[in-house]
Image (spheres, rainbow, N blue to C red):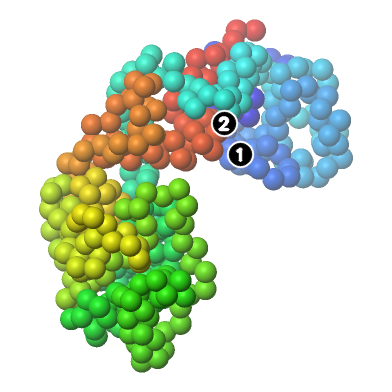
């Protein structure tokens, strides 16, 4: 009933109070999730007179007394009592009768809501309904979600920039580092970059060994085992110990690197080696990044030449029997989606540059849709992604709505429920 009221899914063509006065809802108010009336600051017109105040909703009118509202001064400002069953008259403490209106809801609404949020055994409970929705309706929703996800990333970038006193190059460095964590190690990579200012790296950027020593030393991966089994790790440790004293560095405690059930190319060692190669010779990524206009130019930012040591290794120790390469094409595409486009958008918005913001969206449209379980799930339901902008929208839908069971706030769920919200009494 709260959902029907909030979403204006009135089940009756014309609503009236129980004593026959016509009711017009000008503003349903703001849903209250704490103690007190269900909706604050509502505005309704009853028999031509406009009332502004709170609205309380109950299944039975008698619940007003059962819940003790008749003696609770917090309910003095209730202007309308909305019920399904009119089995009692409700009054304020001074004896004044409160306007009451019946809003009978079809039980099927609750049943369908339960089908959406209560089926943990089904990955996408609304899958059968998606195909029946107008294509433009779904497309518009996915587009809104893609922007929502992009703005979420922009907000994170802006918080980093504020922390770094507005320095865009440093912000780019931290954002790139986080992106190289590919989700699972994103937080450790961000903490690593924040613990190692770009200015320190810049003083030794002419030496790839020094850059690797700084990054691996700060990462905590130059542990006793690595040093014992690999002479290069021991060399990096010695170099790091010297540089740590020089710059007053302290290795962050327990960065929480994750490597269990992970494919070797995704080991943090490999990603740190890529970051070091990008920092070698000086980090001037931001200006290059802002010039990227298509998938190829964006992906080329993440294919630096690795040191000979890392061209055949996934971590410290044993050498592979073949050259491994830098990042795969698909991984570089992920970086373009999660790093390049958000940074372009953040920069454009901060400067009031609409063309740069539009370029960020155009870049996502130019990149092929991501290939993952979320995109495949919606493809089976009839929503296919042809570009990264659409796949980002689907990921946002899955993560922020489906997995959170926020079907009431999803346009697809809303559409499904609105079909059965109307019942003639």
* Residue receiving disc 1: 31
Residue drawn where x is 42% and y is 75% of the image: 228
Give the labeled residue for mark 2: 6
Would residue 407 appear left or right of 315 to someone viewing this image? Answer: right
Q: Nearer the viewer, residue 323 or 257?
A: 323
The Cα atoms of the two marked residues, 2 and 1, are separated by 7 Å
Q: Is residue 132 above or below residue 34?
A: above
Whether residue 95 is visible, yes or no, is yes
Quarter of the image for the C terminus: give it: top right
Task: Verify CB contact (< 8 Å) between mark 2 and mark 1.
Answer: yes
Specify whether 122 is left or right of 220.
right
Crowd around label 1: few <14 · some 14–19 · many ≥20 (10 Å):
some
Residue 408 position (above or below residue 88):
below
Q: Quadrant of residue 348?
A: bottom left
Q: Which residue is located at x 16 percent, y 64 percent? A: 305
In this view, the residue in front, 127 or 417, is 127
Element on which disc 1 rests? strand
Residue found farthest to the top: 425
Q: Secondary structure at mark 2?
A: helix
The earlier-in-sequence mark between 2 and 1 is 2
Circle on res. 43: none
Q: Position of residue 70 (x, y in %)?
A: 85, 36
Residue lying furthest bottom in this view? 246
Instruction: Decide which of 145, 35 is in the foreground and name it.
Output: 145
Q: Position of residue 176 (x, y in %)?
A: 30, 62
Q: Nearer the viewer, residue 279 or 393?
A: 279
| Residue 395 percent location from the top left of the image | 38, 38
């Amino acid at each position: 009933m709260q959902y029907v009221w909030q979403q204006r899914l009135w089940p009756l063509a014309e609503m009236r109070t129980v004593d026959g006065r016509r009711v017009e809802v000008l503003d349903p108010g703001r849903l209250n999730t704490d103690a007190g009336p269900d909706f604050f600051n509502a505005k309704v017109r009853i028999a031509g007179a406009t009332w502004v105040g709170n609205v309380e909703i109950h299944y039975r009118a008698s619940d007003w007394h059962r819940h003790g509202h008749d003696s609770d001064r917090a309910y003095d400002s209730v202007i309308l009592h909305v019920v399904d069953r009119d089995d009692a008259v409700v009054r304020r403490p001074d004896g004044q009768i409160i306007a009451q209106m019946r809003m009978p809801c079809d039980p099927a609404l609750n049943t369908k809501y339960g089908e959406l949020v209560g089926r943990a055994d089904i990955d996408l409970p609304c899958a059968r309904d998606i195909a029946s929705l107008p294509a433009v309706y779904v497309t518009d929703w996915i587009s809104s979600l893609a922007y929502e996800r992009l703005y979420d990333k922009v907000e994170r970038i802006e918080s980093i920039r504020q922390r770094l006193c507005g320095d865009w190059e440093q912000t780019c460095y931290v954002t790139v580092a986080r992106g190289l964590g590919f989700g699972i190690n994103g937080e450790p990579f961000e903490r690593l970059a924040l613990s190692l200012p770009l200015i320190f790296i810049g003083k030794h950027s002419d030496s790839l060994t020094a850059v690797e020593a700084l990054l691996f030393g700060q990462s905590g991966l130059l542990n006793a085992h690595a040093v014992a089994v690999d002479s290069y790790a021991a060399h990096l440790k010695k170099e790091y110990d010297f540089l740590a004293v020089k710059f007053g560095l302290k290795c962050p405690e327990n960065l929480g690197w994750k490597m269990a059930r992970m494919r070797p190319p995704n080991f943090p060692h490999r990603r740190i080696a890529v970051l070091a190669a990008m920092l070698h010779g000086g980090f001037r990524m931001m200006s290059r990044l802002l010039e990227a206009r298509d998938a190829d130019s964006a992906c080329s930012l993440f294919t630096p030449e690795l040191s000979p040591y890392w061209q055949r290794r996934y971590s410290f120790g044993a050498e592979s029997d073949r050259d491994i390469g830098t990042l795969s094409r698909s991984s570089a595409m992920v970086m373009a989606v999660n790093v390049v486009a958000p940074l372009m958008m953040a920069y454009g918005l901060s400067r009031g540059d609409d063309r740069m913001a539009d370029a960020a969206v155009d870049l996502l449209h130019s990149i092929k849709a991501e290939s993952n379980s979320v995109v495949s799930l919606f493809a089976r339901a009839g929503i296919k992604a042809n570009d990264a902008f659409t796949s980002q929208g689907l990921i946002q839908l899955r993560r922020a709505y489906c997995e959170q069971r926020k079907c009431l706030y999803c346009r697809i769920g809303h559409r499904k429920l609105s079909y059965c919200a109307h019942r003639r009494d």
